[in-house]
Image: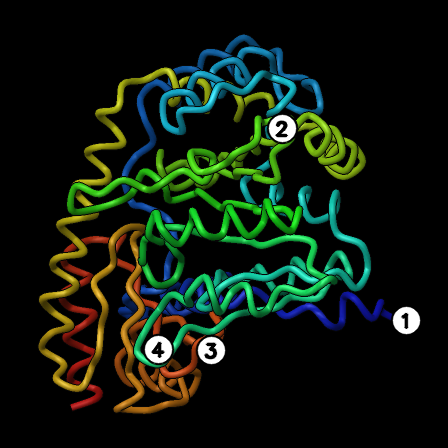
Amino acid sequence: MHLSQLAMSIGQSATLKLNELAGNLKAAGKPVIHLGGGEPEEMIPSGAREEAEKNLSAGFVRYTPTTGTAELKKELCLYTKKHYGLEPEPKNIVVSSGAKQAIYNFLMAVINPGDHVVFPAPYWVSYPEMVKMVYGMPVAVPPRPGELVPTAEDMEARITSNTRAVLLNSPNNPSGQLYSAEFIREMVEICEYRNIYLLMDDIYNRLVFDGAKAPSAFSFSTRGLEDSVIVSINGVSKTYSMTGFRIGWSVGSEAVSKAMAKVQAQVTSCPSALSQKAALGALRGTDDFVETLRSGLEKKRDTMLTELAKLKKVKLRKPQGTFYCFPDFSAYDSDSARLAAMLLEKALVVAVPGKEFGLEGHLRLSYCGSLTDIIEGVERIRKALE
């Protein structure tokens, strides 16, 4: 039997592959420490659990409208006003089965075969593959030596007449870097001038440290929402520790939202009704849950930095958000895949090779697990390398 060229060309998700490998090792009784994961260990908000339980007990869980329930979209309008300073209407919002589906909906809605999508490196591992899945051309823009964010000038230099969209993820997975307001302002200006889309992957935008705040691209726009080139993606997975509920959403013009809705209608029909209720319960809660999660991650980041400082040859830029860091291990081994394989074999520590994120010589290490795992995991790495 033949498989499609598309299916054969798409790489397996490196992070999901490592999750599976780590799970198999643990099942075999190995004391594996997973520093490659991407989900907070905190329990979900009580409001999310209560809403899900109440609606499950009612025994009436059915299809919802394709773009999400009216009550959830109304709440997301309030959320967007509060955290973005933007007042969308329900017609501007599409609720999806996770932020990942929202990104894919967007790409399906705006990219024609051969169109270019430009994004900075390092990038989330799925970006290139998702662009390829809609027969587009992924264009990664590397940073200058010693940096983790390219300049707006370097980004613009890679934009051509074939470019249909720019994709930004800030704070960034894997680097934890928060793109500056100046960088985002320049990218908004470039995209508006060239009339190309700017997709903002804001999934970590409230998990920011040191008193900083993630700038909203909408605040730099000279256009109203209905004429905007900006589409924002967010979800409950990271901010509310609700990875398994698979609820994300997009905010954009009515035209692009309608196109994304048509795509979603033919792929998944609608998001889970039960998950939408849980998301509603989380969003209606106070900010206490998010602040507790955020401040806890900040302390874990500080612990990770302290432990990594014991590896004398490691170079590391301080993460400003997310729950990842992206240290440069090239002084030990410039082949990140080989280094990650060695650490798994000798130290039983899972780390994700930087190669998967478009920047060789680095490893992505996560600090969303326990403090014990962070300290022990980095100590095992140190012993294996030194």
Which residue type carries mark 4? His
* Helix, strand or loop status at disc 4: loop
Q: How is the image coloured?
A: rainbow
Outermost residue, right side? 1
Q: Is residue 256 above or below residue 114?
A: above
What residue sits right under mark 4 in the picture? 362
Would you identify the image quadrant in which residue 99 lies? top right
What residue sits right under mark 3 in the picture? 355
Residue 62 located left or right of residue 13: right
Mark earlier in primary sequence (1, 2):
1
Residue 278: where, in percent of width, then height? 46, 22
Is residue 349 at all visible to an observer of this figure? Answer: yes
Which one is in front, 100 or 37?
100
In whole angstroms, how far apart are the C-alphas of marks 2 and 3?
33 Å
Q: Is residue 183 above or below residue 347?
A: above
**Residue visible at 45% across and 67% down in the picture:** 18
Which one is in front, 346 or 166?
166
Mark earlier in primary sequence (2, 4):
2
What residue sits right under mark 2 in the picture? 94
Residue 373 located left or right of residue 337: left
**Residue visible at 84% across and 69% down in the picture:** 3
What residue sits right under mark 1 in the picture? 1
How many residues crowd mark 3 within 10 Å: few (<14), some (14–19), many (20+)? some
In whole angstroms, how far apart are the C-alphas of marks 1 and 2?
37 Å
In whole angstroms, how far apart are the C-alphas of marks 4 and 3?
7 Å
Residue 83: where, in percent of width, then height? 36, 27
Mark earlier in primary sequence (1, 4):
1
